[in-house]
Amino acid sequence: MATDRCVLIDRFLDWLKVVKHLSARTIAAYRDDLRALDQYLQQHLPTVGWAELGSESVRAHVAEAHRGGLSGTSLQRRLSAIRSFYRYLIREGHSLANPASGVRAPKSPRKLPNVLDVDELGAFLELPGSAPLTLRDQAMFELFYSSALRLAELCALTWADYDAAEGMLRVLGKGAKTRIVPVGSKAAAALSRWRQHSVGGGDQPIFTARHGAAIAPRSVQARLKHWAREQGVWKRLHPHLLRHSCASHLLESSGNLRAVQELLGHADIATTQIYTHLDFQQLARVYDAAHPRARRAVATTPAITAKARKPDA
């Protein structure tokens, strides 16, 4: 029975590769999640096939994995893989129902993205020197912050994507969706300086490595780490931190959640709403520090308290 289960998993993974054209990384994630379920069945229900598996068994598997330390987010991904697998099994006639359709993963506390404040970012972006490598890095970092790009989006940019006259950039985002984003004046000036030293135009990459090929994501991360040390930034700097900071600063200034959603390229506005929590945290800190009815009472020592107390009447 276990062999039959594995055969159907392999067929499903082949279908994902050949028909759905999913990436090797995504297929590997499906494989890990489905094999984890199969291992659970080998231990607890070795004679049960995919067609006989019930919701209570899927729920028990999720509970056991959660007790073993798997996060709610990881369990949500696993349930998504199981649901997709069963949609395939139903379509191919190997099952009549989807036992994972009514199962929910435990919620994980949502982590808020870290951001740099405006002053911290302003100081970091003033890279010293005019060497070509420095000009390239400054243009990269300015564009990250100006247009809230993802790392893969920045590495894939060509000069044909950039309209300097209009100050606009065409970005190919997730799901091969294209969006147009503005480029700020500081980023435009940095791009102009870098363009004088870069080789090529048109379909050539905007940001290149030594041999003219598009810069690799790991190289961008390494350059950020290098400049963080040089500029004395002790927070962990990574490309998404610049993206998060841009979104947070825009929302804080404008309050326009829909515009920020468009800039970031989020398909669902619920994804963008995490930045409203960041903004609220800032508001709460300002309120606690400034509002006369919100200020925390300063603790006093017993000696001071005793001196200030009036004698009983």
Image: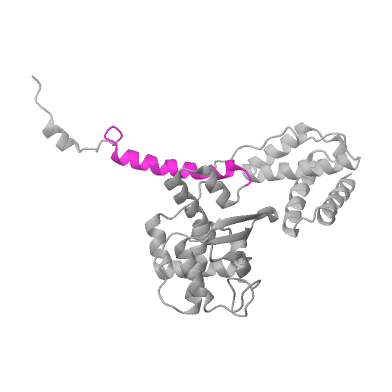
Q: Is residue 115 magenta?
A: no
Q: Is residue 273 left or right of residue 40?
A: left
Residue at screen point 69% across, 53% down: 175
Q: Is residue 162 left or right of residue 26?
A: left
For the stretch drawn in magenta, what is the main secondary structure? Answer: helix
| Residue 199 horizontal/vertical position (percent) | 59, 79
| Residue 47 horizontal/vertical position (percent) | 87, 39
Q: Quadrant of residue 65?
A: top right
Q: Is residue 49 left or right of residue 219?
A: right
Q: Is residue 48 visible?
A: no
Image height of 308 relative to 21, above or below: above
Q: Is residue 85 left or right of residue 239?
A: right
Which is nearer the eye, 12 or 246? 246
Quadrant into which the N terminus falls: top right
| Residue 102 horizontal/vertical position (percent) | 73, 32
| Residue 246 horizontal/vertical position (percent) | 48, 54
Q: Residue furthest right?
A: 93
Quadrant into which the C terminus falls: top left
Q: Is residue 79 visible?
A: yes
Residue at screen point 75% across, 45% down: 81
Q: Is residue 287 magenta?
A: yes
Which is nearer the eye, 152 or 181? 181
Q: Which residues are magenta?
A: 267-294
Number of dots carrying numbers: 0
Residue at screen point 52% across, 78% down: 196
Which is nearer the eye, 18 or 304? 18
Q: Quadrant of residue 25?
A: bottom right
Q: Residue furthest front?
A: 165
